[in-house]
Image (cartoon, rainbow, N blue to C red):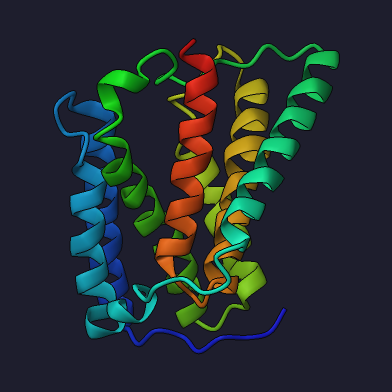
Amino acid sequence: MYEIDSLETTNSRLFGGAIFLLLGFLALETISWAWAGLFVGGLIAWFIAFRKDSFKVSTFPRRLWLIPLGVIAYLVLGILIGLITRLLGFEWASNPASGKLGSIIFMIPFMLMGEELLGIGILEGAKSKGFSFLTSSLLSALIFGLMHTFSYWDGSIVSTIAHVLLLQGVARLIFNYVYLKTGRSIWGSWFTHVLVDLIALSFTSR
């Protein structure tokens, strides 16, 4: 995988950005009305960490065909992983938003942009410290997956960790790849993320 230039930042700015990402995530998880917590925290975090370089990832995505391809790739992998893990005896918790699509549909774009600001923020932060894109993407996927642990807790640490790494972690890898290949555009990964969640929630809301 080819290398990309790093966004300009410093250790202190990255630390400040991480604090606001964490605060935004905690608000989202613990305060019922703070559904935009991660979105707001993410915007502040990016301004602190990357300043004007933040705009480098906000370009209109190229290769738009990669967006539906990313959606299909995740849905196929998700179905296969689900089938295999059921055969192995795992009973994973469903999406907490299942059956609520109608009541949260206008919140979804902001909530998922918050998740993109976090996932891509970790990727770009690691990249700025000299890690390769692959290593940075794996770190992003690991943290992104683990942040879903409480949402998908099923009573077993092994089952829950397997769930969030194999589904949410793999999803992050796909979103990161789309981000890179659509011209380092956070809109590319966001569009993919929104479509994946809308399709998944449409089926579970029936």
Residue 110 lies in what quarter of the image? Answer: top left
| Left or right of 1 on screen, residue 46 | left
Q: Position of residue 189 (x, y in %)?
A: 48, 58
Report the front residue among 158 and 97.
97
| Left or right of 167 on screen, residue 200 | left
Report the front residue among 67 and 9.
67
Q: Residue at x 45, y 81 (%)?
A: 128
Q: Position of residue 51 (x, y in %)?
A: 22, 80
Q: Quadrant of the N terminus?
A: bottom right
105 relative to 52, above or below: above
Q: Is residue 152 visible?
A: no
Q: Position of residue 89 (x, y in %)?
A: 80, 11
Q: Position of residue 46 (x, y in %)?
A: 26, 68
167 relative to 186, above or below: above
Total marks shown come to 0
Q: Residue at x 47, y 62 (%)?
A: 188
183 relative to 163, above or below: below
Q: From this viewpoint, which residue is outermost toward the front?
A: 65
166 relative to 180, above or below: above
| Left or right of 52 on screen, residue 160 | right
Residue 56 lies in what quarter of the image? Answer: bottom left
Q: Is residue 106 visible?
A: yes
Q: Residue at x 44, y 17 (%)?
A: 98
